[in-house]
Image (cartoon, rainbow, N blue to C red):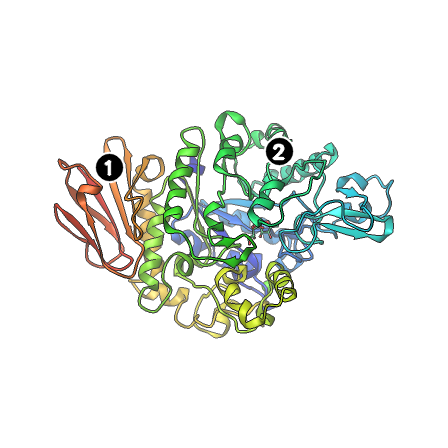
């Protein structure tokens, strides 16, 4: 199945490549880089939203589902990009954001005009209670989820910013309008949708108060509403089933228990979901800026648990970052001088040897790192700017808040891609919309192309390695050494072949006992690794240097 075997490369267009010097990445910028993307060996491109948008949340606030954002280009540019992808055998997965629209969408402009406007019930409008919002829900991006609107003396619901009002999916006209927009893009020939916060489209219409003391529990209570599966089955019937496309749903609150309800083959809803559980591992009760160290055992366990939860009926998504979470090497590896490259390569092995469809976020393939701007003025993301206001109100200083942003903020992955060592990393000839990471002279695509030992060349090799055998896509997955604080180890088995993957998640040499990961009558043959020379091993032990990853065939 193409969407099971294919590898996805994710583009955040604003930060990818600027073709006209206005400081904002654009569609022609993507067209210029299609050969580069193809050269990685990937098969699909997930493109973050490119529709018309006032950019309160960088395109996740859509004001016209049928048009391209002016800053990004025109529909002609889009068509040329799509043709350029298809010519190279690359499929295009677009982002579908239909839980909410922009408040500047014509539907919402109508909706807020009067209580009897035909578009009134396209959104959720409710009366307040004695000057209070209808309930205590808190937005993902700070403050109440209810915004008071004077015109009609009512509140509207927005789970994200107040410029992202939630669409009322109870209304069949809303659903039809979304399906129509989807068909428009499918008829153009796109190959699928990544569906933004799809777990939130159905609401509990009694709008009960939530437990707002625990952020995860709170957002979990907004998710998987009573009609979500009915809506997705309808969407599948009306639209998805008519095309040869793939879908991947995103959303908090899709836990292992619910996953199969979304992706079980017999359910006729979606092909895959993103599990965000491992993405939230650093978050504390007060949300992501209340962060704590990652629990490595839990991190490993999640891959195992999800694999079991999805079983044969479902299919997984394997990813370590996207446009919402920190850089892979900074978060799960070590981005210092000594270990950046080797740990980025090891994490590529982790990604490319798991069972499921693999997603690689732009810049990951050259080992780009988190950024540490020294002033909040350099940050752009609405999430972090709103959170900063909140934490300031709680008495926090900028010096105290910055380390939290450096560790957890979304702008870590939204600084421009480093194409070369010219000013602004070759991303733009103008002034970039967000500062570039100052380490671009060392870490950039041109440098990586020239260095046979680069993270980039390793990604290409590892992608080829995965593709050379269906074992990596379809083979069964069994973890070992589950209690080991440094080693991530698992076997993949397929049609009589067995491979063992051992990954050292530490700076230090680790010794693994072969008897802990293979039977005594089996022997190992080295197959693939991230160091120049093969990993050292004998019949009893495997020695892994700092951040070394090794793959053995077991016979
Ligand atoms: O993100 C949904 C989501 O779960 C985020 O709120 C996530 O928890 C947060 O970004 C972590 O910091 C999707 C998009 O991926 C995100 O970029 C959008 O801002 C959001 O929906 C609203 O559309
Ligand atoms: Ca531009």
Quarter of the picture holding the N terminus: top left
Q: Is residue 237 above or below residue 122?
A: above
Q: Is residue 425 left or right of residue 104?
A: left
Q: Quadrant location of residue 56?
A: bottom right
Disc 1 to disc 2, how far (Cα)? Answer: 40 Å
Tell me, yes or no, if residue 196 can be seen here. Answer: no
Indicate whether 51 appears above or below 221. below
Q: Residue at x 37, y 46 (%)?
A: 300
Residue 448 image-quadrant placement: bottom left
- Which residue is identified by label 1? 498
Q: From the viewer's perspective, is residue 526 above or below residue 58?
A: above
Determine which of the numbered discs, if any, sits on residue 450 in the image. none
Quarter-wise, where is residue 543 in the image?
bottom left
Is residue 103 shown left or right of residue 504? right
Identify the image quadrant of the C terminus: top left
| In this rendering, the label closer to the viewer, 1 or 2 | 2
Can you see residue 384?
yes
Compare residues 287 and 62 and report the one nearer the observer. Answer: 287
Furthest toward the top, the residue is 266
Residue indicated by mark 2: 228
Horizontal and vertical percent position of residue 339: 32, 64
Horizontal relation, residue 376 to residue 143: left or right: left
Mark 2 secondary-structure assignment: helix
């Amino acid at each position: 199945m193409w969407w099971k075997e294919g590898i996805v490369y994710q583009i955040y267009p604003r930060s990818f490549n600027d073709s006209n010097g206005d400081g904002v990445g654009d569609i022609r910028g993507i067209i210029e880089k299609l050969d580069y993307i193809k050269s990685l060996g990937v098969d699909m491109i997930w493109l973050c939203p490119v529709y018309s948008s006032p950019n309160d949340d960088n395109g996740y606030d859509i004001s016209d589902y049928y048009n391209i954002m002016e800053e990004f280009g025109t529909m002609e540019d889009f068509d040329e990009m799509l043709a350029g992808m298809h010519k190279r055998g690359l499929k295009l997965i677009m982002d579908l954001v239909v839980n909410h629209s922009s408040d500047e969408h014509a539907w919402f402009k109508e909706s807020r005009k009067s209580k009897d406007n035909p578009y009134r019930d396209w959104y959720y409008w409710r009366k307040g209670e004695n000057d209070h919002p209808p309930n205590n829900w808190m937005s993902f991006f700070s403050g109440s989820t209810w915004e008071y609107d004077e015109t009609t003396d009512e509140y509207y619901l927005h789970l994200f910013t107040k410029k992202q009002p939630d669409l009322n999916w109870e209304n069949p006209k809303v659903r039809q309008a979304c399906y129509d927009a989807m068909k428009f893009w499918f008829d153009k020939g796109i190959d699928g949708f990544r569906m933004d916060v799809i777990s939130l489209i159905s609401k509990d219409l009694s709008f009960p108060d939530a437990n707002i003391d625990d952020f995860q529990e709170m957002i979990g209570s907004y998710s998987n509403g009573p009609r979500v599966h009915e809506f997705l089955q309808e969407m599948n019937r009306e639209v998805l089933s008519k095309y040869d496309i793939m879908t991947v749903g995103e959303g908090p609150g899709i836990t292992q228990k619910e996953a199969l309800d979304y992706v079980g083959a017999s359910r006729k809803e979606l092909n895959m979901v993103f599990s965000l559980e491992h993405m939230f591992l650093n978050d504390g009760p007060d949300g992501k800026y209340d962060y704590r160290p990652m629990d490595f055992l839990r991190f490993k366990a999640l891959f195992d648990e999800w694999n079991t939860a999805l079983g044969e009926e479902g299919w997984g998504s394997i990813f370590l970052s996207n446009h919402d979470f920190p850089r892979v090497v900074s978060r799960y590896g070590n981005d210092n001088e000594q270990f950046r490259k080797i740990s980025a390569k090891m994490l590529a092995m982790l990604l490319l040897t798991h069972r499921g469809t693999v997603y690689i976020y732009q810049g990951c393939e050259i080992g780009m790192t988190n950024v540490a701007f020294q002033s909040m003025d350099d940050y752009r993301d609405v999430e972090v700017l709103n959170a900063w206001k909140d934490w300031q109100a709680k008495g926090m200083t900028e010096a105290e808040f910055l380390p939290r942003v450096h560790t957890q903020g979304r702008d870590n992955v939204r600084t421009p891609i480093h194409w070369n060592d010219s000013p602004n990393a070759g991303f733009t000839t103008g002034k970039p919309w967000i500062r570039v990471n100052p380490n671009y002279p060392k870490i950039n695509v041109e440098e990586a192309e020239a260095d046979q030992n680069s993270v980039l060349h390793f990604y290409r090799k590892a992608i080829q390695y995965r593709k050379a055998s269906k074992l990596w896509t379809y083979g069964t997955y069994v973890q070992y050494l589950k209690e080991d604080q440094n080693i991530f180890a698992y076997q993949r088995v397929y049609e009589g072949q067995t491979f063992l993957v051992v990954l050292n998640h530490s700076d230090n040499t680790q010794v693994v006992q072969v008897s802990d990961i293979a039977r005594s009558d089996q022997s190992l043959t080295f197959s693939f690794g991230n160091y120049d020379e093969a990993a050292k091993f004998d019949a009893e032990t495997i020695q892994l240097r700092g951040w070394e990853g090794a793959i053995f065939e077991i016979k």
